[in-house]
Image (cartoon, grey):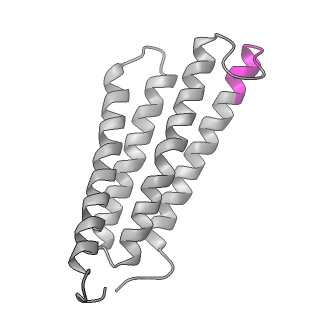
Amino acid sequence: MPSALLPVTAVYAGLLTLWIIYLTVRVGQMRTRHKVSLGDGGERAVLHASRAHGNAVETIPLTLLLMALAESIGAPAIALHLLGLGLVAARVLHGMYFFGGARVLALRSVGMGLTALVQLVLALGLLAHGIGHLGGGATP
């Protein structure tokens, strides 16, 4: 039965917001360390921190919206938890590439690929549900 409270999405929204806050702090630290007040000032460390943050902000909200929609129409909690955990893992792997001492491109690639997979599963599930309910089909 769908829940108006969206407790599963709420858990991952909270966790991923904490991640974004961490990335925001990292950008501030890099700018302070390299004396850059705006942009990246040509400093790779600032650029990397900014892109880690920017990519998270570009991908997390949409994915949480998809999760909330899926939860609101009754997607199984276990599926939502698996997708939520996948998204958290994806975003942390992606961020580790930018903050690791030795940049391992595989971290970034796996992080982006897993993020896209979570989004794809959610999008296809919502699309199938929506099409299945067009034209007077059963209500959720």
Q: Which residue does the image show at 31% across and 73% down from the upper left?
A: 75
The answer to if 124 sits in the magenta stretch is no
The answer to if 29 sits in the magenta stretch is yes
Image x and y of residue 51, in percent? 54, 28
In which quadrant of the rendered image does the N terminus lie? bottom left
Image x and y of residue 34, in percent? 72, 13
In the displayed structure image, the side of residue 124 where residue 81 appears, left or right: right
**Is 38 placed above or below 57 here?**
above
Q: Residue furthest front?
A: 135
Q: Which residue does the image show at 43% across and 14% down from the upper left?
A: 102
Q: Nearer the viewer, residue 133 or 140?
A: 133
Q: Nearer the viewer, residue 16 or 61?
A: 61
**Is 35 placed above or below 64 here?**
above
**Is 40 placed above or below 58 here?**
above
Q: Nearer the viewer, residue 80 or 66?
A: 66
In which quadrant of the rendered image does the C terminus lie? bottom left
Q: Which residue does the image show at 69% across and 13% down from the upper left?
A: 41
Span of residues in magenta: 28-36
